[in-house]
Amino acid sequence: MTRAVSLFLEARAGIAGVSSEDSMDDMWREDGIFVRDRMKTATAFLFLLAFASTACAQPCESVQCIDTLFRDIYSLKLSRASAVARVREAHALLRSLSRKGGIERATSAAWVFPLRGHSAGSIGGRGTGYRGAASYDFFSGNSHGGHPAHDVFIRDRDFDDLDDKTSKPVDVLSVSAGIVISVTASWSPDSMDAKGRQPIRSGICAWIYDPVSDCLFYYAHLRRAACTVGQTVRPGDRLGEVGRTGKNAYPHRSPTHLHFMVLSFRDGLPRPRDIYPELLRASTR
Ligand SMILES: [Zn+2]
């Protein structure tokens, strides 16, 4: 873009020195480039510049920008092509932040189970709830297929978000180290999707990027988020509390649970990964 602008300014400077009476020979410059051709090229660049600025936003240069990008993808505000390109750029930014030491790192040996006081026995169907990874599409917003995730249940027979034994909320803990890249801090049953037909699926949720596994960790249906975008986390850090927000979690037919999904980057794009074996080994807090 900068090249296009400087080329245009150069071309303008060249044209300014050429009056209408100048012969064709005078319009040759010392470097042998014909000024008129330069101006045509510069005009074409400017058209491209104008088109590009309306067709897609600039690549993200901050984690806050990635937060906005994720919300825009979830509410289908971007074209698919634009969303795919921008997620690739966001991934490159996160890799670069990690190389500069701006993100916490820990191997999977240090991973912590995502609900305080719970372990793998609280995972629905002993891990068989993870299904449909092939039909899941990160870019389809509120209406993706499959359930390439694990639901981790708490004891909450009266659906008040609180553990029936302790009468307290259950903390959601970060499994991995990483950086918080997106948080949805509020939700109500009236939060409709892009078509205005059904409540937004995820409810209150948080996304963490872990540079060691190169994965996104997604924690959804929270009662409350206790983390902020840009914050770095260690395994076991508190991200929020289990709740019942989101389209499928809100109705009383659904027992209170954490929806936990991991997406692994392949070719710069997030695709589901089943970390049930790692959850079996994760330490409990
Ligand atoms: Zn789920």
Image: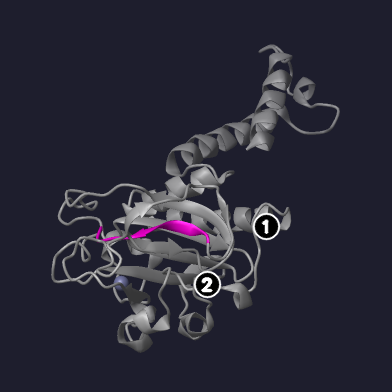
Residue at 72 percent across and 57 percent down: it is 99
The vertical placement of 63 against 257, above or below, is: above
Residue at 17 percent across and 50 percent down: it is 196
Query: Of tags 2 and 1, which is closer to the observer?
Result: 2
Looking at the image, residue 116 sits to the left or right of residue 13; the answer is: left
Contact between marks 2 and 1 (CB within 8 A): the answer is: no
User: Where ligand 1 lies, by quadrant?
Assistant: bottom left
The vertical placement of 128 against 234, above or below, is: below
- Of the image marks 2 and 1, the number of the one nearer the N terminus: 1
The disc label shown at residue 98, or none: 1
Name the image quarter holding residue 165: bottom left
In the rendered structure, which amino acid carries the disc numbered 2?
A: Val
Looking at the image, residue 219 sits to the left or right of residue 47; the answer is: left
Q: Position of residue 278 (x, y in %)?
A: 52, 82
Q: Position of residue 81 (x, y in %)?
A: 43, 57
Q: Which residue is mark 2?
A: 112
Count the labels in the image. 2
The answer to whether residue 78 shows anywhere in this view is no
Secondary structure of residue under mark 1:
helix
Q: Position of residue 197 (x, y in %)?
A: 15, 55
Q: Position of residue 250 (x, y in %)?
A: 19, 61
The disc label shown at residue 244, or none: none
Q: Residues within 10 Å of mark 1 (few under 14, many from 20)?
A: some
Picture quarter with the N terminus = top right
